[in-house]
Amino acid sequence: MNPGSTATWARRVRLWQRRLRMQRAAARARDSFARRTRHVPARVASDPLGVSVVGPMAAASGMGQATRATVNTLRHVDVETVDVDYDAGAHREPPSRDLPFTIIHFNADRMLEVRAALHPSLLRDRYVIGVWFWELPEFRADWLSAFNAVDEVWAPSEFIGRTLREAAPTTVPVVDMPPGLTAPAPSTEGRAEFGLPPDACLCLSVFDVSSQVARKHPLAAIAAFRAAKFAHGEAALVFKCMRADRNPQAIRELQAAADGLPLHLITDDWPVARVHALMACTDVCLSLHRAEGLGLTMAEQMWLGKPAVATAWSGNVDFMTADDSCLVPAALVRIDRDYGPYLEGGHWAEADIPVAAAALRRLATDPGAARAMGQRARARVSHHFDRHSRGQQMRHRLLALQREAAC
């Protein structure tokens, strides 16, 4: 047997063993689901409305932003909250006020671990809600037991909600609950401060290297920009990469793929406000992602009046339409190997590169049309993520649970 055949055989054995482990994990979880009943603690009805919000409160990550958004949105509609910063160790202490709801901002893969680490007073006789992100249409079987750690899940997008509802037991509601956001703050920084050309059409991709570069797929953005065949000085590609030190090999591959193109690669880790300032002085949001749970950086760029060229699939289509964005058709494909938590055999999308290239050319050569689309994008996003509307949605759900507990 040659080495290639041996490697192929070993890989098949590993995949078979993993499928078997997944099937066993799913069977155990579903057996526990069958024994579970729906229960809303009585104190939810008797106590004043209030929420302990658990999560990485100060983190620059998407989950950190989601945690802060929940706090600010609930406070905006006068729901009492207590911050429980998990990363700072606050979860090990009883909260400063005893409130009937606990909302935990960690994904399903960490839910059992996080719950076990929380102070008992955050869980005992509380109604526990998980806020989970996930980017594929299939939920991992080895994470099903996470549903046993919560009474309910809030899905930040319809895309996530559909996936979770297919997996969840009937006793655990999954509620679509987009975050409430506010417009990025204005900035006085311009292109000169970022070392960017003053006159070119700047196409910006923002992504976190720790979120799996293969999923964000900046190589597709490079391919589309190259296919657009811009004249010298007409356009430039800008990549803002967070946590680039997590995968230096991926950064080298991006630089090699963009050889000969006007690529401005920014790898410094900045506060959110400075990233927003960079977004404000560019022209086009470019995201040919393979999968997004929500698509926060796209929403932020649109809120700043930037038209988006983006894959027409996954969480971002909640707040993008053909009227306010250049949605790029995509084919759903099988994942060919493991990419971090995204396992071989799952599915994500491959955007149509020629269509994306044509969209980039249209926006770069017709700035008036691009500005008009950007204004429609701003209106769309500001409505979708309106903090007051989303806060009322959260409040109404919590009040409905109080009524359920009273029955």
Image: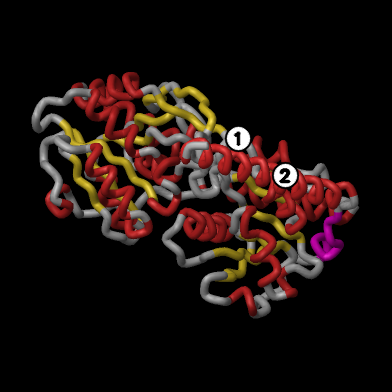
Q: Is residue 35 left or right of residue 208?
A: right
Residue at image point 23% right, 23% down: 228
Q: Nearer the viewer, residue 29 or 116?
A: 29
Q: Which residue lies furthest to the left in this view?
A: 232
- Horizontal side of 229 relative to 115 (left or right) equals left
Q: Quadrant of residue 75?
A: bottom right
Quadrant in the rendering for residue 9: top right
Q: Does the magenta stretch include residue 40?
A: yes
Residue 389 visible in the snapshot: no
Amino acid at dot 2? Leu
Q: Tell me which residue sits at (49%, 60%) in the image.
A: 64
Task: Check disc 2 and report the residue beneath it.
Answer: 20
Q: In this view, does 3 lie above or below 142?
A: above
Identity of the amino acid at label 1?
Pro
Residue 51 in picture, x, y percent from top left? 66, 63
Q: Which disc number belongs to residue 224?
A: none
Q: In this view, does 164 lie above or below 152?
A: above
Mark count: 2
In the depicted structure, whether residue 75 falls above or below residue 240: below
- Chain part drawn in magenta: 39-46
Can residue 310 be seen by looking at this rendering? yes
Name the side, left or right, on which 251 lies relative to 135.
left
Residue situated in front as seen by the camera: 235 or 136: 136
Element carrying mark 2: helix
Residue 137, numbered circle: 1
Q: Residues within 10 Å of mark 1 (few under 14, many from 20)?
A: some
Question: Within the magenta stretch, is there residue 168?
Answer: no
